[in-house]
Image (cartoon, rainbow, N blue to C red):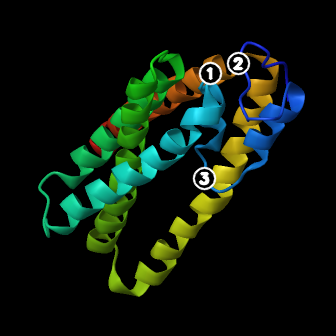
Amino acid sequence: MGNHSSYSDPVEGVEGEDASSITFSDNCTNLTLLTVLSSDMSRCQCLLVSAPGFGAVAISFFLSTHTRLKGMRRLLVAASVIYASAIFLFAISPFMILSVILLAVVGSMQMSYRVLARAIIQEECPDYLLGRAMSLFFLDRGFGSLGAVVLGSIGAIVPVPVAVAGSALLCGLVSWLLPRTAVSRASL
C-alpha cells in the first residue's frame, strides 16, 4: 500500500506494511481510509471510527424534529462544502481531539446530505418517476467503493494526508461550483 513508516504502530501488534493494509482493507465505512492518519491508532482508533456515527445520529435527531426546512438546496450545498472542509481539516490536523470533532462533523454532514437530497427528490419528482429516482440513491454504495479504490491508489503513491486533503479540496470545489453552473445554464 505504500510506505507509511512515519505513522508509529498504527495497529497494535502489527508493524510496517501489514498495519496499513489492515486499515485499508476494512470496508465497513468509507471513512476507514481516514483512520490511517492518526499517529496513535492503538489507543484512539475507536474514537476516530465512532465519531462519524455520533455526528450522524446527532444530526438525525435534529433533522427528524423539523418537518419542513426552508432553503433545502442551499442547505444541501452547505452540507457538501462543510463536509469537504471538515475532511480537509482532518487530513491536516495534528490533534486527536480536533480530529474526533472534525469526524463527527463529517458524519453529520454525510447524514444531512443524504436526508436533504432525498427530501428534495421526493418533493420535486413526479409521482410516476419517484420509484426510479429513489432507486438511484442505491448507486452511492458502488460509488463509495470506487472512491475508496481511487483514494487508496493515490494514497499508495503520495502521503495519505495529502491524498485525503486533495480529494476533500476537489470535493469542496465541485460542491461549490456545480450548483452555480446549473443555475447559470437554467437562466439561459
User: Label 2 near label 1: C-beta < 8 Å?
Assistant: yes
Q: Nearer the viewer, residue 78 or 130?
A: 78
Q: Is residue 114 above or below residue 106?
A: below
Q: Residue at x 36, y 66 (%)?
A: 118
Q: Which residue is mark 3?
A: 29
Q: Residues within 10 Å of mark 3 (few under 14, many from 20)?
A: few
Badge number at residue 7: 2
Badge number at residue 81: none
User: Label 2 near label 3: C-beta < 8 Å?
Assistant: no
Per the image, label 2 sits on a secondary structure element best described as loop
Q: Is residue 87 above or below residue 134?
A: above
Q: Residue at x 63, y 17 (%)?
A: 162
Q: Residues within 10 Å of mark 2 (few under 14, many from 20)?
A: some
Q: CA distance from mark 3 to mark 2?
A: 21 Å
Q: Nearer the viewer, mark 3 or mark 2?
A: 2
Q: Nearer the viewer, residue 101 or 122?
A: 101
Residue 15: x and y, percent? 85, 27
Amino acid found under the numbered disc labelled 1: Ser
Q: Pick whichever of labels 1 and 2 is earlier in the sequence.
A: 2
Q: Nearer the viewer, mark 3 or mark 1?
A: 1
Q: Residue at x 67, y 43 (%)?
A: 147
Amino acid found under the numbered disc labelled 2: Tyr
Residue 149: x and y, percent? 76, 42
Q: Which residue is mark 1?
A: 39
Whether residue 113 is visible to the viewer of this picture, yes or no, is: no
- Give residue 95's quadrant in the image: top left
Quadrant into which the C terminus falls = top left
Q: Pick whichever of labels 3 and 1 is earlier in the sequence.
A: 3
- Give residue 23's quadrant in the image: top right
Q: Pick whichever of labels 3 and 2 is earlier in the sequence.
A: 2
